[in-house]
Amino acid sequence: MLYYKDIVFLKPLPEEIRRLGLLPADLHFHTRHSDSPTRVRDALKLAARRGIGLAITDHNQVSGVAEAERQGIRVPLIPGIEVSANDGPHILLYFYSVSDLLDFYRCHVEKNRRNGPYTAIHLDTSEILDRREGYACIAAEAHPCGYAFLNRGVQRCVASRCIGEEIFSRLDGLEVICGGMARSHNLKAAGLAVAHGLGRTGGTDGHLLYELGGVVTCAEADTVEEFLDAIRAKKTAVIGRERPLFEKAVMGTAVLPHHLPYTVPILQARWEQDLPRIRKFVAGRLNR
């Protein structure tokens, strides 16, 4: 098994991390503004108690970040969003200011959302990355090696030739520990980040409050701006562990009711995402 000095598969201890002069932050967390039952205020209060920063990265939505800014709870709040691309990958965008995040959402995400608010929008990965140009932000890819049988994750899309490998050069980082993935997935993601010279990020992909802080990205930073600069400069460490299977099942049960009302648009989006692979498979069989 491969190991990396800046990627540590252990339970994070925020007090010890801060004693080293580092700021720990969970960079992938969802609230009730998308497909989670967790209230923004509860997430902020727990992050404050644990002494960690927080990126609220709701699916194709930013109202949770706007609410968090209004709360006035003293937490390093990293303005974020998880944008589901039409061709599969989930792009985590972290902005240097809430105002830039809100502007990006209004101009580029909101008008391209489907009826299913948590599923893929009508923009491919390259289009999303095109539209983030001109904004001060960091682009990382969530769970980059995909999962289950779905055509998600930039590595899986590149392997199936749905996306060209040059897409890696347009990213600032990869999520090398995702709390919802398996260890094998995260090790592959770490290898991808090294191979393509990308920054390392990590987060729980949490939807339930107790998951918050189970994976943290650490940087020598006192401000959100310095933290994001550290990701771009590849000067972060990621510490955390994947959730056990039972906890993943609990989370899935909690999330399912949020998705059921949008079953039809979700299935339609999944079909569109998988169609390029299906066509290539059929063409390959016919050409034999």
Image (cartoon, rainbow, N blue to C red):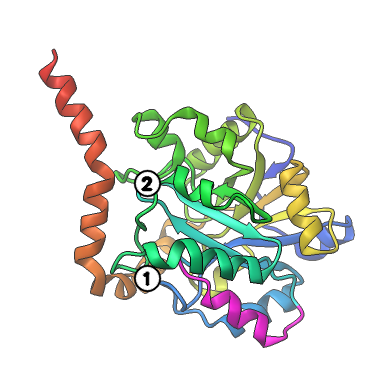
Q: Is residue 105 magenta?
A: no
Q: Position of residue 49 (x, y in %)?
A: 73, 78
- Label 1 sits on residue: 255
Real-space Cα separation, disc 2 to disc 1, in angstroms: 20 Å
Left or right of residue 29: residue 162: left
| Tag of residue 172 | none
Q: Residue at x 59, y 64 (%)?
A: 80
Give neighbour class at mark 1: few <14, some 14-19, many 20+ (Cα, 10 Å): some
Callout 2, which amino acid? Answer: Gly
Quarter of the image for residue 72 reads bottom right
- Label 2 sits on residue: 88
Q: Residue at x 14, y 27 (%)?
A: 282
Q: Position of residue 138 (x, y in %)?
A: 65, 51
Left or right of residue 181: residue 173: right
Of residue 48 and residue 119, the one placed in the foreground of this image is 119
Q: Secondary structure at mark 2?
A: loop
Callout 1, which amino acid? Answer: Val
Q: Residue at x 40, y 68 (%)?
A: 250
**Closer to the observer: label 2 or label 1?**
2
Left or right of residue 192: residue 276: left
Q: Residue 198, can we see it?
A: yes
Quadrant of the drawing holding the N terminus: top right
Magenta stretch, main secondary structure, is helix
The magenta stretch is 60-74
